[in-house]
Image: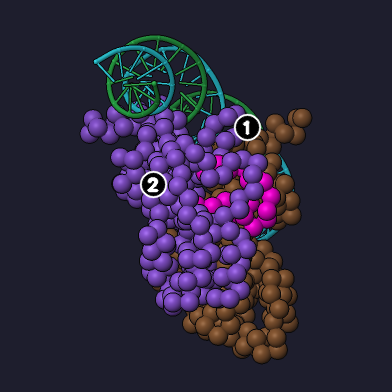
Chain colours: A purple, B brown, C green, D cyan
Amino acid sequence: MEIETLIMHFKAYLSLNEEEIQELSSRVSIRTIKRRQFLLSEGEKCKHYNFVVSGCFKMYKIDPAGKEHNLLFACENEWVTDIGSFHTEKPSELYIEAIEPSTVIQIKKEDLLFFYMNYPKFDRNFRVIIEDKFVELQNRLLQTFSSTAEERYLSFLDQYPHLLQRLPNTQIASYIGITPEFLSRIRKELSRK
Amino acid sequence: MEIETLIMHFKAYLSLNEEEIQELSSRVSIRTIKRRQFLLSEGEKCKHYNFVVSGCFKMYKIDPAGKEHNLLFACENEWVTDIGSFHTEKPSELYIEAIEPSTVIQIKKEDLLFFYMNYPKFDRNFRVIIEDKFVELQNRLLQTFSSTAEERYLSFLDQYPHLLQRLPNTQIASYIGITPEFLSRIRKELSRK
DNA sequence: AAACAGGCTTAATGTAGTTTAAGATTTGAG
DNA sequence: CTCAAATCTTAAACTACATTAAGCCTGTTT
């Protein structure tokens, strides 16, 4: 069952009793998403926390010039959500799109609040998760300022080796903040060495 | 009293009773910091959550080429901490340095854990605070990818107008990810308009 | 008053990355 | 299997920003 994946994910951080597992099971919903289908589009409110059971998503922005900028990829056992829009309930500027056929578990805001109210451990759980993500993001920003495109590509490979096979180079280029053409040049130079 | 500032800050998010205020007062310490003095240096473990009562700090990294990259400025009523180092207890790669004579309130890890254990509302409080910071950081990363240096400078002025007076241009340049020389050119062009 | 230092500007030159455009290769739908 | 669409590569011209180095203020030290 899909919900098992989510329970295992939570158990890595905290212990859950039968009652909590029951509540979890009854308050989430499972959705199957086709490749290229959207979980969120610009202008919509982000209404769910999405937990990826299988498959892979990208979350990105399209800038005024029409270019895509990948904020993150989310595969198995990861969360994808526009937290800003989710909390403020304002329209999102982001897209969340399936790169592969995928399955997600969705939690609506009212249900998340239910967990926060009744089981404070969920506050702690999501605090810890987001603290980790915050540190990751901070490092990425620092790297963007202080490294060359080649260094960023190498460290992407280092951090997400499994994604290299699953993603086209255009997506990776968008993630590290360069054009696909320049990434192509970098790859050529690296293979010469 | 300095502690009042912290209590007011918390009260913007949650209600505190007498007992909690007592605990807070007895478990934090107040430090006066001179200009150019460090709260944290590369290689040290980050042992405190720091809340700025007065003054202003920068948190930055020095890259292998010896250049400073400002991650953030923290003035009155803001937190400055290397969360990564604080939680992993590994040496930090960051510096936290006073830009002005300052006063901070420090919470040690064991005391923060005490609050998390005994008053779950602190979990929620810091979850909400870091969620906001996360969204801010995400927007900054997106902007770094999709805007020119001039746009980033204008939006810095827009977001932090009060910092313009308090900071030298070199610091602002380092924050938006360009050299001071290029910032100078941007300012010149803007003033021509 | 002279000397010095820190921060700001200007301008010449250098470079990492973009743009555009064309051709080659792979993928996927029917 | 086939054809169209998506992706990848190459290369030339171009641009945004970095580097270096010199000169200028303003405030501070002696």
The quarter of the picture where residue B91 lies is bottom left
User: x, y percentage for residue B49?
Assistant: 55, 72
Q: Which chain does the numbered disc 1 sit on?
A: A
Q: CA distance from mark 1 to mark 2?
A: 29 Å
Q: Which residue is mark 2?
A: A55
Question: Is there a contact, CB below 8 Å, between mark 1 and mark 2?
Answer: no
Q: Residues within 10 Å of mark 1 (few under 14, many from 20)?
A: few
Label 2 crowd (10 A; few <14 / some 14-19 / many >=20): many
Which residue is depicted at the point 74% across and 51% down? B161
Q: Which mark is residue A64?
A: 1
Provide the chain ID for the residue under circle 2: A
- B84 part of magenta stretch: no
Q: Would residue A144 be visible to someone looking at this image?
A: no
> The magenta stretch spans which residues?
A79-96
Image coordinates of residue B151 in percent, x first then y, are 65, 37
**Rendered image quadrant of residue B80:** bottom right
Identify which residue is drawn at 57% across, 65% down.
Answer: A112
Q: Nearer the viewer, residue B90 or B189?
A: B90
Using the rendered image, report if marks 1 and 2 lie on a common chain: yes
Is residue A94 located in the magenta-colored stretch of the structure? yes
Residue at image position (36%, 38%) is A167
Rendered position, B6 above or below B131: below
Question: Hey, what amino acid is under mark 1?
Answer: Pro
Seen in the picture, residue C11 relative to B91 is either above or below; the reply is above
Q: Can you see residue A39?
A: yes
Which one is in front, B119 or D3? D3
Residue A51: x and y in percent read: 46, 56
Closer-to-camera residue (B183/A108): A108
Q: Which of B50/C21 is in front?
A: C21
Say what secondary structure mark 2 lies in: loop
